[in-house]
Image (spheres, coloured by chain):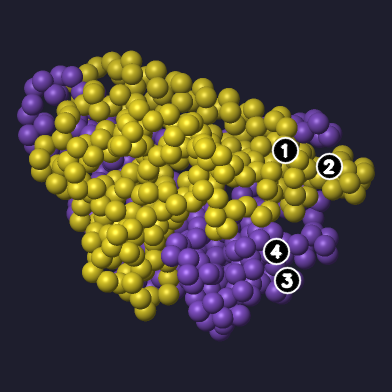
Chain colours: A purple, B yellow
Amino acid sequence: MSETEYAIHPRSTLHRHKERAHYDYGTIHKIMNTAPIWHVSFLPSDPSDPFPCMLPMLGQMASFANPDADPEADALDLYIHGHAASRLMRLPTASSQGNGNGDENEGVPVCISAAHIDSLILSLTPFNHSSAYRSAIIHGYATTVTSEDEKLFAMYRITNGLIPQRWENSRSPPTKSELISTGILRVRVVSASAKVNVGGPSDDRKDLKNEEVLDSVWTGVVPVYERLGTPVEAPVNRVKEVPAYLKGWIEERNREGEAYAKKTATMEKKKG
Amino acid sequence: MSETEYAIHPRSTLHRHKERAHYDYGTIHKIMNTAPIWHVSFLPSDPSDPFPCMLPMLGQMASFANPDADPEADALDLYIHGHAASRLMRLPTASSQGNGNGDENEGVPVCISAAHIDSLILSLTPFNHSSAYRSAIIHGYATTVTSEDEKLFAMYRITNGLIPQRWENSRSPPTKSELISTGILRVRVVSASAKVNVGGPSDDRKDLKNEEVLDSVWTGVVPVYERLGTPVEAPVNRVKEVPAYLKGWIEERNREGEAYAKKTATMEKKKG
């Protein structure tokens, strides 16, 4: 573990395709903070229920204690946003009442995952098909944020993480009642890892010598990227031009997303 | 529960925004089978580890017992694909050796989630920002598929679910050794639910009467969709034209994805 890596624990250690593993802050933070959605899993609050729970949520990694943290050099917490009355937001309170899953002092143990698919890799045979992707998995303890300042900080970061400069360009700050009905969980990272795959098809020697297969099977990469479309104004909208901060961000995101997905096709795979 | 719905259990019942809930086969199967990635969560195999586990995986819903099942009218199982030696694939075996999380007869309890983001909904105030999305969460028991026929069935469905007609248009069927190193889990559904949101911004009456806010804040919807780019051939590729099945599918997927995301902006929200 270097000074710019999260702790490595057996639960977060990659055993297969170790060459795809990353534990550094920069890679993990970037995957999490550009993912449109996080999947949050937690243990059932009813101890007789054998199934883990999962919810898709919005969030951002940031540090209230160190707001100017450098995402490449400093550890961050996770902030998850939801309605104050939702199941996930009520979890730390429910847990401290004794369901046995959490430790009052630590918080509720959660696992959070985010993944981007960057390509479909079409090899000569279905078995060797794969994809370029970037995924991160984080384990940590979730607690409810109660300080108003920290709540505002998290709401600001989540809003602007999703749509840069939106906070400043909409009616903010939130009212008292908006603040009360917003739930924010802070997750302290215990262990984390990322997995990144790039490159083109890898095929078996036998298939690469099979003339009939080579002559008939198209092989290569189909880039996959998320695209933001032309904004559609709401019936009540009075601002006739799409503002520059929004237009510029949509164009930049689209350009970068497409360029990276295309680039993965010719990127060199690390050796296993 | 109707005859074309999965069982509703408290763990899968939506309490907030009930109008967004769906329990029918058609909605759930479509969300799962068009998602580029599933998130699979399961309990830790080490009972002293407090954290749930999660892995991003590929899969498809289908029924080996009823291969011609109508996704709108019939229940399906989930098939998850991985390397036979991976942690998830070895889970049912490890579990039956007594980690206490699973029941040998039932399988390993898992929770599987898939989500599509269809838009960003920009309201007048950060608090009312939301998004159009389709998500599904399924709880069920996972067992390892050992029958060669069922394994082949699952591999065929997963390959063609990801890229239609790819199985027939690449070197198939798999060799014996490919079959052995492919792990397939079958998950029998116990409970399932989907959540779908569409529409434009909803704002508070007070903000909608604030002339300064109305005059300065752009409000509307930014469509979000996954795009498949121009295929990039591999250095060994000899099939000079991108085949029609691939080209046609890319065009259709892109057209449909963009059209649906745009459409959500003007779709009527169901009343809560």
Q: Give the left or right position of residue B214, taking residue B23 as reference.
A: right
Which amino acid, mark 3?
Asp
Q: Chain of mark 1?
A: B
- What residue is pinned by disc 4? A84
Rounded to the nearest angstrom, the CA distance separating label 3 from label 1 is 35 Å
What quarter of the picture does the N terminus of chain A occupy? bottom left
Relative height, residue B112 to residue A46 (above, below): above
**What is the three-letter code of the residue carrying label 4?**
Ala
Q: Earlier in the sequence, mark 2 or mark 1?
A: 2
Q: Which residue is mark 1?
A: B270
Amino acid found under the numbered disc labelled 2:
Ser
Secondary element under disc 1, as helix, strand or loop, is: loop
Q: Is residue A160 left or right of residue B43?
A: right
Q: Mark 3 against mark 1, which lies toward the viewer?
A: 1
Mark 3 and mark 1, same subunit?
A: no
Q: Where in the figure is residue A197, as x and y percent of width and height?
A: 32, 48
Circle 2 is placed at which residue position? B216
Q: Give amino acid for label 1.
A: Lys
- In the rendered image, residue A158, in percent from the top left (x then y), is placed at 63, 56
